[in-house]
Image (tube, helix red, strand yellow):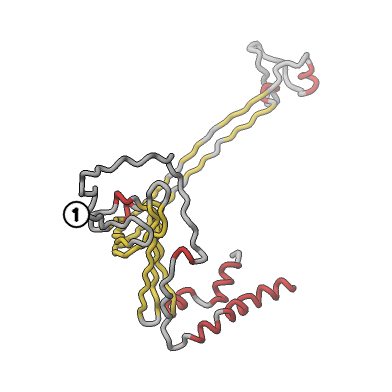
Amino acid sequence: MTRLKCIILLPFLLSGCNLAERLSRIGDPPGLSHIQDPTLLPSYQPVSMPMPDPTQAPRADSNSLWQTGSKAFFKDQRANKVGDILTVSIDMDQEQKIEMTPSITQQSNLAAGLTNLYGMRLRTFAVKPPTTTGQDVGANGANNLLKADSNPSLNGSGSYTVKDKLKFNMAATVIQILPNGSMVIEGRQELGLVNEVREIYMTGVIRREDISSSNTITTPKIAQLRIGYRGRGDLTDNMNGPLAHQVINKLSPF
């Protein structure tokens, strides 16, 4: 009974936790978050990936003033250290389609019997004497003392189709340099519209060689890419429904 009371009171307790925050922004749009160092966020975790054995860098040509991949004559304008900014061109038009039509058929037969057991079959199994071919006759033949047949069959079909389409540009900041020279980038954007705030989050691992001369990189060249698009505000609250309904949906086994 005590457990039932706790389950009933839980939605009201959870809704009360956010009641003051919701009441405080009645008539006001949700505020934008402050710009801060991504590495200081509680959810930040440094990236650790397999690294090759360290090698000695080749000696640069001291007689050349030109740097490989440089846009300017004396300086490479591409991002190369922590804090540098580059542009990420996100252009994703993916369609995943999987169709399965499994068909499994299996057939097995098992038969075992006693053709002769030192004359005991006549008294034990009450069968007729063997014929000239050496086989018992009649329905109670000892040759068919044990028999099993199995013929399982499985037929099914399934279809799975997902379409994703994203196309926009956003700026990202280099937040970490890995031992092999690859860079971890992260970008965040927020857009306030009426009483709703839309947040875009992106992070991934890139190679400096893949950055174009215009300091731009495309999504196919970003490893471990993570893109998040979410919102907060009145529209999101209405789409999610009351907190009590959300708790019931999570706890309900039906």
Q: Farthest residue toward the bottom?
A: 27
Q: Is residue 73 above or below residue 3?
A: above
* Residue at the extreme left: 73
Q: Position of residue 192 (x, y in %)?
A: 36, 78
Q: Position of residue 101 (x, y in %)?
A: 42, 45
> In the depicted view, which residue is nearer to us: 157 or 199?
199
Amino acid carrying mark 1 in the image:
Phe
Residue 86, by quadrant, is bottom left
Could you tell me which quadrant the N terminus lies in?
bottom right
- The count of marks equals 1
Who's the residue at 42% across and 41% down the image? 54
User: Who is closer to the viewer here, 36 or 97?
Assistant: 36
**Is residue 155 rendered to the left or right of residue 168?**
right
- Please tell me which residue is depicted at 71% across the width and 20% down the height of the picture: 114
Where 184 sits versus 114, above or below?
A: below
Give the structural element (helix, strand or loop) at label 1: loop
Based on the displayed image, in which of its 4 quarters is residue 116 positioned? Answer: top right
Query: Does residue 127 lie above or below 172 as drawn?
Result: above
Q: Would you name the residue on which mark 1 appears?
A: 73
Q: Residues within 10 Å of mark 1 (few under 14, many from 20)?
A: few
Q: Position of residue 126 (x, y in %)?
A: 77, 23
Q: Nearer the viewer, residue 92 or 43?
A: 43
State the residue at coordinates (25%, 54%).
212
Residue 133 appears at what percent x and percent y? 63, 12
Instruction: Give the left or right position of residue 121, taking residue 225 as reference.
Output: right
Is 187 situated left or right of 10 in this image? left
* Figure quadrant of residue 145: top right
Name the residue located 46 percent from the left edge and 48 percent from the top edge.
49
In the rendered image, which quarter contains the C terminus?
Answer: bottom right
